[in-house]
Amino acid sequence: MKRICLSTPTMHGTEQQMIQEAFDSNWIAPLGPHVNAFQKEIASYAGDNSHAAVLASGTAAIHLAVILAGVREGDIVFAPALTFSASVNPVCYEKAVPVFVDSERDTWNIDPCALEKAFQKYPHPAAVIAVHLYGTPAKIDEIRSICDQHHVPLIEDAAESMGSRFKGRMTGTFGDFGIYSFNGNKIITTSGGGVLLSHDEKIIERAVFLATQARDQARYYQHSTIGYNYRMSNVLAAIGRGQMPYIDEHIRKKKEIYRQYQDAFSDISEITMNPLNFDGDANNWLSCMTIKEGCPVTPNQIMDALADNQIETRPIWKPMNLQPVFSDCDFIQIENGISVGEDIFNRGLCLPSDIKNTDEDMERIIGIIKRQFL
């Protein structure tokens, strides 16, 4: 039985040609011509006068953003509860304190109303982190406006949403800092890697300095501040350059997968697909579904049925306010009782979203899911 994965890299052959160039020139170690070219290509793709530093991971990019935003030990940082832990772990690297904010049902992203409530309780946070969950743009203009009113830097975690747009503008370009991820399951991949974006070229220059062990400009090895080994290698950048020409094709196929699920489940009232922001254009990185409250069919039942047929799924991210490691952190929500994020987590799952899925693969997945509701 063919195994169907959640989301795997899709290679086109161009990547191998770029890697061969790196090998032929012996640019194997960090830095090199592919790194410089990849940074320019990403900045050009993001637009809006962006500058870019390619790094070892999206997490490294968030960590540098936290540092460059001026976050220090004991500072408060607002972050969405419904996200992957990499969005907030770097806050703790700097011994700052995350305060988690609930989601809104419209987009599953951080709720601007709950964010305002967080500012009422904690008037002086050091930064706000916003995430575009599963590739769906948040209400980033409202979030940006709130941050501006309070003179607080915005870190925009667009790790899952490269290529998504909000009101015609690329996600990752609204914040003081933007992040994309090139992990193996993302829209494009470098195997592992990420990028930090900023409109301020000097910020990116500082990020590159910190990412290369913060070595001072001296003939000998001199360091006046703590640095990190966060730079992307020339070989991985070569993979990314080979992927860039295909990003729009990847997004188009992701959208097709979402539409196939949406059409297939339109006659099952118990299923709702993850919402889209109608002011935006999502890349549909992962297609997700929720099951109507009170329905006897559970997400675990569907995931187990698919797993029995060699089909990979994933639960919705478990909210950070429910994670043992963050049990002492505050959580801000608008609705009483169960939070929006916890409700989505309880009733949802991520569906196979690999762009290499054939029509037969999709029919197989959909047929198994539908049979659970008979």
Image (cartoon, rainbow, N blue to C red):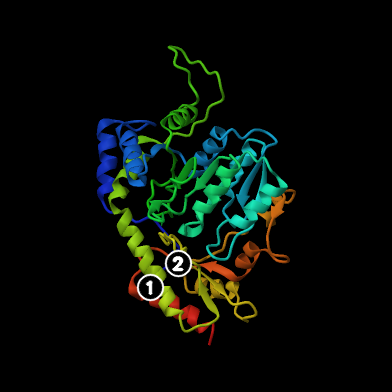
Residue at the spot x=33%, y=54% of the render?
247
Residue placed farthest to the right in the image?
328
Is 341 placed above or below 123 here? below
Q: Relative to 300, is 179 on the left or the right?
A: left
Is 144 placed above or below 284 here? above
Frontmost residue, 240 versus 275: 275
Percent of width and height locating residue 175: 49, 44
The circle drawn on residue 104 is none
Residue at the spot x=61%, y=44% of the render?
89
Badge 2 element: loop
Residue at the spot x=47%, y=57% of the render?
137
Hey, what amino acid is under mark 2?
Pro
Inter-mark Cα distance, 2 to 1: 10 Å
Q: Relative to 74, is 299 on the left or the right?
A: left
Is 144 placed above or below 361 here? above
Q: Image quarter for residue 148?
A: top right
Characterize the local packing of mark 1: few (<14), some (14-19) or many (20 or more) Cα atoms within 10 angstroms. some
The circle drawn on residue 361 is 1
Residue tagged by mark 2? 352
Nearer-N-terminus badge (2/1): 2
Frontmost residue, 256 versus 146: 146
Percent of width and height locating residue 85: 59, 50
Percent of width and height locating residue 67: 56, 33
Residue at the spot x=27%, y=50% of the render?
245
Badge 1 element: helix
